[in-house]
C-alpha cells in the first residue's frame, strides 16, 4: 500500500485507557513539548524509538477484530502528521474511530497548518483530539481520558466544519 515509515516508541494492542472501548494505541517517538511530569518521557527524543513501515502497523490493527478504534499518542503525533494521515485514511476505511493526543491546541494546529506539515490532513481523519500540554499543577486523576484540567477533548469533524474548537465528552 504505502512505502511510508513512522518512528514509534511502541504500541499497545488492546488499550482501555487511551479512549473509549478497546483501542490499538501507537506511541509516536519525538516530542518538542517536554512537559514536566510527562507520562511518556522516553518518547521525547526524536532519534529514539524504532522506524517501522506503516503497512506493518496497519496489518496489526486489522488483525485484531475486537478493536473499537485507534489512538495516536506520543511523543507528539503531529510531528509525524503525514505518516499518521495516510494510516488514518486506511483505518477509517475499516470503520474504526481515531483519537489523537497532542500537546498542541486545535487553534495552533489550524493557524500553523500548511502544505508541508499535514496538520489539517491529520485532523481531517481524526474523530477527536485531546489537545493541550500536560500541566502537572493541573493533574487530575478523575478526568476521563485527560491528564490535566487544561486539556480539552475536541470533536474534529464539527470543529473543522465550524472553524472553531468544539469541545465534547467521550
Image (cartoon, rainbow, N blue to C red):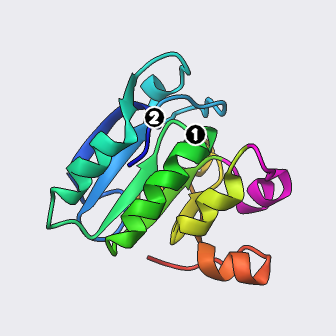
Q: Which residue is mark 2?
A: 6
Q: In front here: 130 or 61? A: 61
Q: In front here: 72 or 85? A: 85
**Which residue corresponds to the image point at 65% horizontal and 83% vertical from the top-left?**
158
Image: 170 above or below 110: below
> Does the CB distance between marks 1 and 2 fall below 8 Å?
yes
Residue 89 horizontal side relative to residue 151, left or right: left
Residue 107 lies in magenta, yes or no?
yes
Q: Residue furthest top?
A: 47
Looking at the image, is mark 1 or mark 2 earlier in the sequence?
2
State whether residue 145 appears in this view: no
Mark 2 secondary-structure assignment: strand
Q: Which residue is mark 1?
A: 80
**Which residue corresponds to the image point at 23% horizontal and 64% vertical from the top-left?**
22
| Inter-mark Cα distance, 1 to 2 | 7 Å
Q: Residue furthest front?
A: 1
From the top left corner, tell me how far across and down residue 138 is, in percent: 60, 51
Q: Quarter of the image holding residue 56?
A: top left
Number of numbered labels in the structure image? 2
As drawn, the label of residue 94 is none
How dense is the environment of label 2, judged by Cα within 10 Å: few (below 14), some, or many (20 and up)? Answer: many
**Which residue corresponds to the image point at 56% horizontal and 21% vertical from the top-left?**
46
Residue 157 horizontal side relative to residue 146, left or right: right
Q: Which residues are magenta?
A: 104-116
Image: 150 above or below 39: below
**Which residue corresponds to the image point at 62% horizontal and 63% vertical from the top-left?**
123
State whether residue 69 appears in this view: yes
Mark 1 secondary-structure assignment: helix
From the top left corner, tell me how far across and down residue 130 is, in percent: 55, 60
Amino acid at each position: 500500500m504505502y512505502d511510508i515509515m513512522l518512528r514509534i516508541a511502541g504500541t499497545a494492542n488492546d488499550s482501555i485507557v487511551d479512549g473509549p472501548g478497546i483501542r490499538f494505541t501507537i506511541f509516536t517517538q519525538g516530542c518538542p513539548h517536554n512537559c514536566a511530569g510527562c507520562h511518556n518521557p522516553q518518547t521525547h527524543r526524536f532519534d529514539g524509538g524504532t522506524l517501522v513501515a506503516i503497512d506493518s502497523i496497519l496489518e496489526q490493527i486489522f488483525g485484531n477484530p475486537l478493536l473499537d478504534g485507534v489512538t495516536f499518542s506520543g511523543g507528539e503525533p503531529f510531528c509525524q502528521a503525514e505518516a499518521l494521515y495516510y494510516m488514518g485514511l486506511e483505518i477509517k476505511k475499516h470503520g474504526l474511530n481515531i483519537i489523537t493526543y497532542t500537546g498542541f491546541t486545535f487553534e495552533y494546529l489550524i493557524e500553523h497548518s500548511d502544505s508541508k506539515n499535514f496538520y489539517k490532513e491529520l485532523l481531517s481523519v481524526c474523530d477527536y483530539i485531546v489537545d493541550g500540554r500536560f500541566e502537572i499543577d493541573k493533574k487530575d486523576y478523575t478526568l476521563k481520558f485527560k491528564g490535566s484540567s487544561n486539556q480539552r477533548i475536541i470533536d474534529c469533524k464539527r470543529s473543522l466544519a465550524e472553524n472553531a474548537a468544539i469541545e465534547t465528552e467521550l
